[in-house]
Image (cartoon, coloured by chain):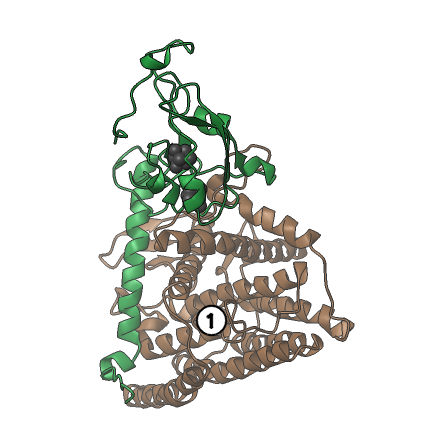
Chain colours: A brown, B green
Amino acid sequence: MNYLIAFLIVGFVFSAVMTFMYLLLWMERKQSAVMQDRIGANRATFFGLPTMMGLWHNIADGIKLITKEDFIPPLGNRFLHTISPMIALFFALISFAVIPFGGVYSLWGYTVSFQILHLNVGLLYVFAVMSMGIYGFVLSGWASANNYALLGGMRASGQMISYEITMGATVIGLLMIYGTLDLQQINVAQGELWGGWLPLWGVLLQPLGFILFFTAAMAETKRVPFDIPEGESEIVGYFMEYSGMKFAMFWQSDFIETILAASLVTTLFFGGWQVPFLTADGFHFPWGSVWNLPTLVVMVLQVGAFLGKVFFFCFLLMLIRWTLPRFRWDQLMKLGWTIMLPLSIINILVTGLVLVLLKG
Amino acid sequence: MAIKKVVETGLWERSYVPEIIRGMALTAGHFFRNMALHTAHVFGLAKDRRGSATYQFPEERRPLAPRLRTLHRLTRREDGSPRCVACMMCETVCPARCIYIVAGEHPNPQIEKYPVRFDIDLGLCVMCGYCVEACPEDAIRMDTGIVEFSSYTREGMIYDLKKLLSLSPTPKRSVPASARPEDLPQLTEPQA
Ligand code: SF4
Ligand code: SF4
């Protein structure tokens, strides 16, 4: 039975991530359209069914990409060329193993934990897996036997490594406050109330850390304004020799990284699955009233809250993606190394100082 | 001397964040305004305000400007015959050389000639409207309002006399085709 629950949770997380990816593809079309006073894709139908505001376009995309020729450059490395999109997608997907989609609930005598893998070094695991993902991009550039693709892969690795440092440095502030690398415990700690009414979400404790982390996470997703590795519009990127479903895998991994960035920001800075004043047995409002709820309802509310927050940050990332122009390479490096890294170190110092002063 | 353009950026602009938020407020403003309008349209409200600047083409057409040059037509006399006198002005002026006219002798000596063939190859036409300007008889116009006349073949783009005439309405007052030449309308000023 415990295995069944574990399987169900894995299935839930996987389908949630894949559904989000599917929705993001649709959102990318529709949100950008509405932002630019357009309507967006709305023509595809499925055997005369209603157009569903363009949702069928994703299926049309899938059919097109699957039936497309899968081209491998004759001088390229067949094996690496085939495996690198898989590496990129694989590492993007398995990072979700430690993301808590909800808390731990006991239902009808069973323990249900909405976290596939309860690791006490969860945060390290995410960073490790994310940096493994770079191999997919670099190898794809190298295996294509194309100088432009190789340069694209190099840009990808340069950018991701630079911003990973900032990303790692910004969470140190949080680690010092919560004293754990366990994402579930970080989430639990964020449910505490300050002065009885203000939920102690990470963003309140680390506002600078949030901005830095959000920017760095955006850079990790390799989307506009940090899309120099891909340069979908004019400079060519690492996947220029890819077609069909292999290309789609890169592009799925981008979307999944967007979701990962959104879920990390949610987990670390916006209370994860925490709903303000909602504890395991119901709402406890600061003015003293209590509204008891069954565990099942609490579970649905909290998981829903997590998905809602992730959705909001996906929306925000999309909004940024369709608002800002791309950074130049030198601006990118300057921003990463001379602004964000020093700021994150200052953040660590200030956090440490405040902690020492508060705790004596 | 090269002009040096200095854009003054203070610390405020260079710190990115406030300016980025300003930009995002603009795009988000558009997003939420349009979303609100689309939602209102679903419920049948605010139909007079558009949620998008684009037109959903086949169902919804953009109003055409009255001066827009669209598909040609040949105007008719009151008896329904072409007003054209095959003077070749349009054929001569056409920069794309896509008009082909064969003149025939008209029974009315006042009209002298009429087109036996009048073909426009719209595949070559650049829609410049010179033919309309050149015509002394107001016999050719580009005011049909038809903008979709694509075809799968090159031959399908060649519009002949019958087709071009059919785009003009048949006159309401029907004059028998065997009307005596004196009964045909006198050639005066081309009507505007
Ligand atoms: S519009 Fe211009 S190109 Fe077309 S038929 Fe007339 S004169 Fe020729
Ligand atoms: S259409 Fe006008 S310009 Fe052309 S041949 Fe006829 S009368 Fe002359």
What is the chain identity of the residue bearing mark 1? A
| Residue found 62% across the figure and 53% down from its top | A8
Q: Report whether the residue tagged 1 is closer than 8 Å to ligand 1.
A: no
Residue identifier under label 1 = A185
For numbered disc 1, what is the local secondary structure?
Answer: helix
| Residue found 57% across the figure and 75% down from its top | A130
Q: Nearer the viewer, residue A35 or A339?
A: A35
**Residue B73: in sight, yes or no?**
yes
Residue B64 position within the rendered picture, expressed as x and y whole percent measured from the top left: 33, 39
Location of the N terminus of chain B (image quadrant): bottom left
Q: Quadrant of residue A202?
A: bottom left
**Residue B146: in sight, yes or no?**
no
| Residue found 47% across the figure and 45% down from its top | B125
Q: Nearer the viewer, residue B161 or B12?
A: B161
| Residue found 32% across the figure and 59% down from its top | A277
Q: Quadrant of residue A211?
A: bottom left
* A38 is higher (above) or lower (below) than B166: below
Residue B114 position within the rendered picture, expressed as x and y whole percent measured from the top left: 44, 27
Q: Name which residue type carries label 1.
A: Gln
Assign ligand 1 to one image quadrant.
top left
Location of the C terminus of chain B (image quadrant): top left
Mark 1 burial class by Cα count in 10 Å: few <14, some 14-19, many 20+: some
Residue A278 position within the rendered picture, expressed as x and y whole percent measured from the top left: 36, 57
* A207 is higher (above) or lower (below) than A193: below
User: Along the horizontal axis of the image, is A304 left or right of A45?
Assistant: left
Residue B97 position within the rendered picture, expressed as x and y whole percent measured from the top left: 49, 46
Q: Quadrant of residue A250?
A: bottom right
Q: How many marks?
A: 1
Q: Nearer the viewer, residue B5 or A271?
A: B5
